[in-house]
Image (cartoon, rainbow, N blue to C red):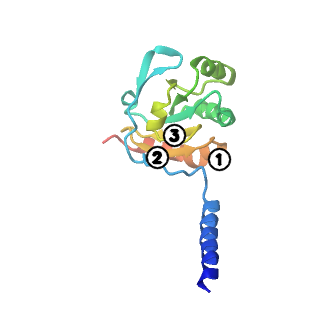
Amino acid sequence: MLKFLTPLFLFIILAVFLGIGLKLNPKEIPSPLIGKPVPEFNLPILHMPEKKLSASSLKGRVWLLNVWASWCVSCRAEHPILNQLAKKNVVTIIGLNYKDEPENAKRWLSMLGNPYNASIVDQEGRTGIDFGVYGVPETFIIDKQGIIRHKHTGPITEDDIEESILPVIFELEKKVIQ
């Protein structure tokens, strides 16, 4: 009898796990970096490769880091949304050009518009790994102390901007550096 019930119990257990998995939102991949300092980086700026930008140079302001690439189809989908956000001028937007050729990235931005205050080049992908990037696009919000406060996986939509991105930015802008 037990010989016949074991497969049934295994099937039920697998069905329960499958049901739980189907209810999860793939955009809500938890990041172990939430609440931790931003990984240190010192990378060349895409349009001025002789200059570098570091995480420490951004302390004292709330900023958004958008990981993107010219070869990324989803990045193209979210790009108009980032351009709209940039026009609102509510946050410093830094691009992390991930595993891309700088010339392709420059051409892409000249065609589609450049929402970034600066875009830094991570051609090897090491900084992306430090941020725990699963794939592009991914977006992080960093507070004035350099602590990661929010992560968004996948392309940002207008709803994401209104419902999760801007509220986090506005809340962090209210907080005073201690």
Q: Where residue 164 appears, x then y in whole percent? A: 56, 48
Residue in the image at 59% along x and 37% along y:
136
Give the number of the mark in front: 2 or 1: 1
Answer whether residue 63 is visible to the viewer in this image: no
How far separated are the C-alphas under marks 2 and 1? 18 Å
Q: Where residue 37 appears, x then y in whole percent? A: 37, 41
Give the mark, 1 or 3, whose residue is nearer the N terminus.
3
Q: Are marks 2 and 3 in contact (CB under 8 Å)?
A: no
| Apparent side of residue 156 relative to residue 41 in the rendered image (left or right) | right
| Quadrant including the N terminus | bottom right
Disc 2 marks a residue whose amino acid type is Glu
Secondary-structure class at tag 2:
helix
Q: Quadrant of residue 9?
A: bottom right
- Residue found farthest to the bottom: 1
Q: Which residue is mark 2?
A: 171
How far separated are the C-alphas under marks 1 and 3? 22 Å
Give the mark, 2 or 3, whose residue is nearer the N terminus.
3
Residue 90, placed above or below residue 7:
above
Q: Residues within 10 Å of mark 3 (few under 14, many from 20)?
A: some
Q: Are marks 1 and 3 in contact (CB under 8 Å)?
A: no
Given residues 101 and 60, the one toward you in this image is 101
Residue 1, placed above or below residue 155:
below
Residue in the image at 46% along x and 46% along y:
171
How far separated are the C-alphas under marks 2 and 3? 25 Å
Secondary-structure class at tag 3:
loop
Q: Which residue is mark 1?
A: 159
